[in-house]
Amino acid sequence: MTYSELIKLKRNPAGLALVALAFLFPLAVLLADRMAGENVRVSATVQSWLQAPLVVVFLLGAYLLTLEGALGTGKWIWTTPARPERLALAKVAATLLVAVASFLFAAGIFGSLPEGRTLLYGALAALSSLLTVTWLSALAGSFAGVLVASAVWSQAAPFLHGLLPEGVQGAVWSVLPALGLTHFEDTAHTALRLGAHAFYLLLAWALWVRRAR
Amino acid sequence: MDSAIEVRGLRKRYGEREVLRGISFRVPRGAISLYLGPNGAGKTTTFRMLAGLERPDGGEVRFWDRPWSPEVRVTTGVTLEEPRFYPWLTGAENVEIVFRYRGVPAARRRALEALERVGLADAARRRFGKYSLGMRQRLYMAAQLFPGVRAVLLDEPTNGLDVEGREQVWRMLMDLAKQGVSLFVSTHQVLEAERYAEYLVVLHEGRVAYQGRYRDLAMRRRILVRAVRPEAAVAALVRAGFRASRGRREEEVYVEAPAEQLARVLEVLKAGGLHVFDGRLEDLEELYWRIKDDVQRTDQVEA
């Protein structure tokens, strides 16, 4: 089924544009930084090698996961033996394949491959984001809906988090659907974080199973 | 009769509106069965339940003498009204994706074979977005021609097609039925039922008004004559021993007699010096209205 998702990208103007955007994003940041004046530094909030995979996750992932709703093709898909959760998994797998390709591209461009824990935490952040995008797509049902929700949340989450008492901030941050902002380096709340992700996994599964009806 | 599909007491309500009021019918194996009813009669709701996309409020759906289960989807193809595929992909790629979802081995080759069967081999590499409505309908059907298909449910497959397109679709469906595939096709066009149905289920306002062989229904057709003086025509026919009555329209006279009696009816009227400008068997549409009136009368009596 993953192959079916990759076929869907073939000649797809919107899908290919999103992939191109993801591949070009770190380059754009790099170029902007080079072209900026001596006293100005342009950078993204994540490491350069992680930028492209995260853009793939947020844009292409959300696009593929909401594609059937946009085109109305789900109507026939649910009359085949294909199961909704397997369809979601295929879309996630296709997104991950493109994300890995974009990571290799970005690593090649910047000439540095992250190693050890840095690579692991980056990969976990991408996976965590993809999990969030998966259930959010099933909930919102549209590409635009996912983008708006993601944008609002990415701005609101740090602000709301800052309002909390300092003692609980770490714990709360670890369970939030952080849309790529999750700090996996913070090992103090690993159990909480794992529990929250297990919950999001169940949520994604339940929402996708419900979609077939 | 061996049934491919059996529906028992199916009920569905949306809010205040009862769409299906405990319908029961059977779809025989290896034949073309038509599901006839006007728009809003509940045909699409029935199809959605047969496809497992909607749960009934009551009743049961059985396929191949077993209660409905997701396994049914393995051997049953379904088309639901408007065909929607990926517009930027070719017809062959779209069918290949459907076959992959179905777990068909050698999906690409099988997709090309299916397109050939529906007469789209030449357009296999053309993008779906460039297909005409007729081609889209045929592609939707090609997607149901997967290996091992035993039944295909088609919800109004000729909607929006011109005469030629409709003819192509029906020719293809007849070929499929000859290969032993059980077909259940919904339509609101009486002419299609008259021409192609071997078996017929007539739905009216959420109730089955008729189910059985088309031939048996056709035998119930009356003789219709249109005469300049209908009252005198009725009197002459009654005198000759026929059961005759006035029709809905001004000059219509219905005679309760089989097709073989048509010549005799016309003879009686000619002998009575009555001018007749039309004499034939009533068509299925006229019969349909009669069945519908009967159902409405039953409803009123029950109420």
Image: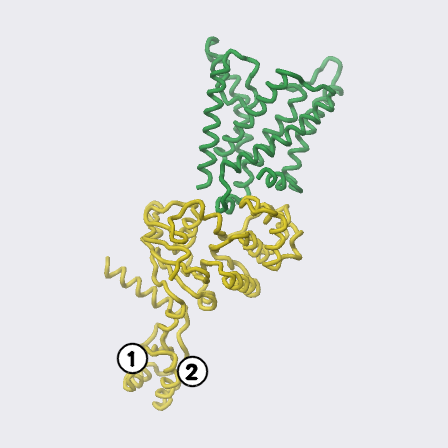
* Quadrant location of the C terminus of chain B in the rendered image: bottom left
Q: In which chain is the residue bearing label 2?
A: B
Colour of the chain lettered B: yellow
* Quadrant location of the N terminus of chain B in the rendered image: bottom left
Give the image quarter of residue B275.
bottom left
Residue at figure coordinates x 33%, y 83% from the top left = B233
Residue at figure coordinates x 57%, y 54% from the top left = B142
Q: Is residue B93 above or below residue B117?
A: above
Q: Residue furthest top?
A: A167
Specify whether B39 is left or right of A26.
left
**Residue A163 at x, y percent in the picture:** 48, 13
**Residue A71 at x, y percent in the picture:** 55, 43
Give the image quarter of residue A133.
top right
Give the image quarter of residue B223.
bottom left
The residue beneath circle 2 is B277
Report how far apart the C-alphas of labels 2 and 1 lie in the structure: 20 Å
Label number found at residue A211: none
Is residue B85 something one can see in this rendering?
A: yes
Task: Please name the amino acid that badge 2 sits on.
Answer: Phe
The residue beneath circle 1 is B243
Is residue B251 something one can see in this rendering?
A: no
Element at label 2: strand
Label the green chain with its letter: A
Q: Identify the mark nearer the N-term, 2 or 1.
A: 1
Do the CB atoms of the residues marked 2 and 1 lie less than 8 Å apart? no
In this view, the residue in front, A23 or B286, is: A23
Task: Please name the amino acid that badge 1 sits on.
Answer: Arg
Element at label 1: loop
Q: Are marks 2 and 1 on the same chain?
A: yes
Q: Is residue B262 above or below residue A122?
A: below
